[in-house]
Image: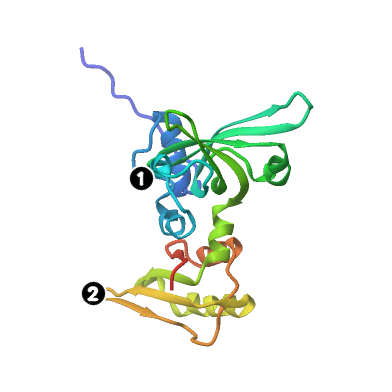
């Protein structure tokens, strides 16, 4: 016998939600699979890390015991402990594309930087390198900075990349207003990719310079989410 036809008027609609940022996507990939699939969270910081760090995790074993080094990477495996005297200190790892290193943040340093220590934060850690007898490195913290803040302070040029379609007169007007409202010492240039593929670099106002900060980067990206902001630490 033929089965009766099934009809329904029920319809399903998925809620409209904001798409994940690239960083959120990568974090969820790592949580679900244990590794990154579509990239690495530090890719967007690569130029800044090269300009600010003095070594990467893979090269620490080639340095000298007692040397002061700066490493850029993501914080992982944070553990806060207490000394016998009751002072708090932290143990964690800094990970980059080349490996990871154990970091010890003793009470004095922990008191200065504890608010900056959180899982998956991208940090610039400066400290004294200790090498065990078999060459395993440990970093003793002297200073911890959010990489965004360190990058902003060291930036010598703001590079704003966009496609021609995203460079409307209204958005460029808002860009000029933003630059005027945040005067500083750092020039801004636009890398424009035309419809025919030609790339053009131009400075919207050769006399106007901006104060670089994470808030500036966020404000630029709010004008158009397709714009890419790079803080160059070299001229």
Numbered mark located on residue 196 in the image: 2
Q: In the displayed image of the protein, which residue is found farthest to the left?
A: 1
- The colour mode here is rainbow
In the rendered image, which residue does mark 1 sit on? Answer: 39
Quick check: 105 above or below 1?
below
> Looking at this view, is 80 or 30 the one in front?
80
Q: Give coordinates of residue 208: x percent, y percent.
A: 55, 84
Q: Give coordinates of residue 49: x percent, y percent.
A: 45, 55
Q: Give coordinates of residue 42: x percent, y percent.
A: 43, 48
Please tell me which residue is depicted at 44% across the width and 49% down the height of the picture: 55
Marks counted in the figure total: 2
Disc 1 secondary structure class: loop
Is residue 99 in view? yes
**Quadrant of the rendering where the N terminus is positioned:** top left
Please tell me which residue is depicted at 35% across the width and 45% down the height of the picture: 39
Quick check: 220 above or below 121?
below
Q: In the displayed image of the protein, which residue is found farthest to the bottom?
A: 207
Please tell me which residue is depicted at 78% across the width and 27% down the height of the picture: 86
Disc 2 secondary structure class: loop
Q: Give coordinates of residue 22: x percent, y percent.
A: 43, 48
> Looking at this view, is 192 or 128 the one in front?
128
Residue at mark 2 to residue at mark 1: CA–CA distance: 28 Å
> Looking at this view, is 92 or 6 the one in front?
92
Occupied quadrant, residue 235? bottom left
Q: In the displayed image of the protein, which residue is found farthest to the right?
A: 85
């Amino acid at each position: 016998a033929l089965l009766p036809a099934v009809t329904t008027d029920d319809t399903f609609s998925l809620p409209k939600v904001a798409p994940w940022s690239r960083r959120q996507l990568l974090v969820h990939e790592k949580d679900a699979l244990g590794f990154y699939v579509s990239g690495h969270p530090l890719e967007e910081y690569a130029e800044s890390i090269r300009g600010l760090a003095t070594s990467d995790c893979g090269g620490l074993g080639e340095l000298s015991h007692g040397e002061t080094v700066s490493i850029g990477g993501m914080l992982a495996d944070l553990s806060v402990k207490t000394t016998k005297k009751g002072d708090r200190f932290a143990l964690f790892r800094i990970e980059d594309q080349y490996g990871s290193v154990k970091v010890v943040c003793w009470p004095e340093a922990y008191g200065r930087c504890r608010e900056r220590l959180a899982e998956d934060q991208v940090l610039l850690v400066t400290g004294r390198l200790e090498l065990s007898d078999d060459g395993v490195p440990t970093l003793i913290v002297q200073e911890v900075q959010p990489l965004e803040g360190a990058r902003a302070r060291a930036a010598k040029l703001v590079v704003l990349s966009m496609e021609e379609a995203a460079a409307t007169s209204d958005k460029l007007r808002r860009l000029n207003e933003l630059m005027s409202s945040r005067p500083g010492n750092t020039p801004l240039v636009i890398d424009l990719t035309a419809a025919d593929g030609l790339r053009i670099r131009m400075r919207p106002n050769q006399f106007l310079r901006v104060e670089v900060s994470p808030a500036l980067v966020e404000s630029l990206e709010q004008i158009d989410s397709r714009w890419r902001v790079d803080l160059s630490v070299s001229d």
